Image (tube, rainbow, N blue to C red):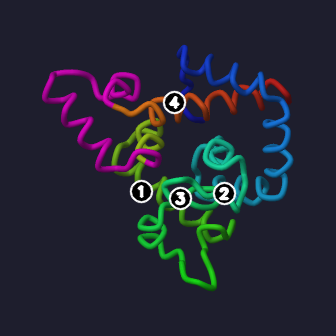
Amino acid sequence: QLPPLDSPLVDKQTQWLVDRPDYVNRSMARSSRYLFYIVEEVNRRNMPTELALLPFVESAFNPEAKSTAKAMGIWQFMPRTGQDFKLTQNVFRDERRDVLASTNAALTYLQRLYGMFGDWQLALAAYNWGEGSVSRAIAKAEAAGRPTDFNSLSAYMPSETRNYYPKLQAVKNIIASRF
């Protein structure tokens, strides 16, 4: 249901995954604990089903994942974003690592971003880069008389964000080819 992206970046990400079958298999094995629940929630909200694969890109479905920037959990919530979505973070509990709570928060956030940008590719870029960054990139492109679609805005994006949607597309392509 997500718009397909045909790009050399997708090819590069696909090749990266194909070259690492152990990583893909480990991630898929981990996903088996959570994927059914996430797919049910995505479908219940009438969102594109492929969004259930986003934790593959974010954390390889590892609820204990922690980035150098202090993002945590399968959805890699930053501390402030977690607070914005009422995820408890204290010495006793960090709901960014709670699959049920963080999935609810992540899907709510993605719905909000889609409402802001009206485009899943831009919503996903905002999930990774921040809504303010995507809004500024759109404003910069509009001021220059350029298009504001994902591919056109990728010139303004950092490498991680430019590769974010292509990684999801690559995961989707690999899974589709397996089944």
Report if the CB atoms under discs 2 and 1 are less than 8 Å apart: no
Q: Which mark is residue 6?
A: none
The residue wearing badge 4 is: 163
**Residue type of the residue flagged with mark 1:** Arg
Q: Nearer the viewer, residue 178 or 130?
A: 130
- The quarter in which the N terminus is drawn is top right
- Which of the two marks, 4 or 1, is nearer to us in this view? 4
Which label belongs to residue 71? 3
Disc 1 packing (10 Å; few <14; some 14–19; many ≥20): few
* Residue 146 position within the rendered picture, expressed as x and y whole percent measured from the top left: 22, 21
Q: Position of residue 42 (x, y in %)?
A: 63, 54
Q: Quadrant for residue 106, please give it.
A: bottom right
Which residue is disc 2 drawn over? Answer: 65
Element carrying mark 4? loop
Nearer mark to the viewer, of 2 and 4: 2
Is 137 placed left or right of 126 in the picture? left
**Above or below, 46 relative to 158:** below
- The stretch in magenta equals 127-156
The residue that disc 1 covers is: 112
| Camera-nearest residue between 5 and 71 | 71
Q: Gap in Å between the C-alphas at discs 2 and 1?
A: 24 Å
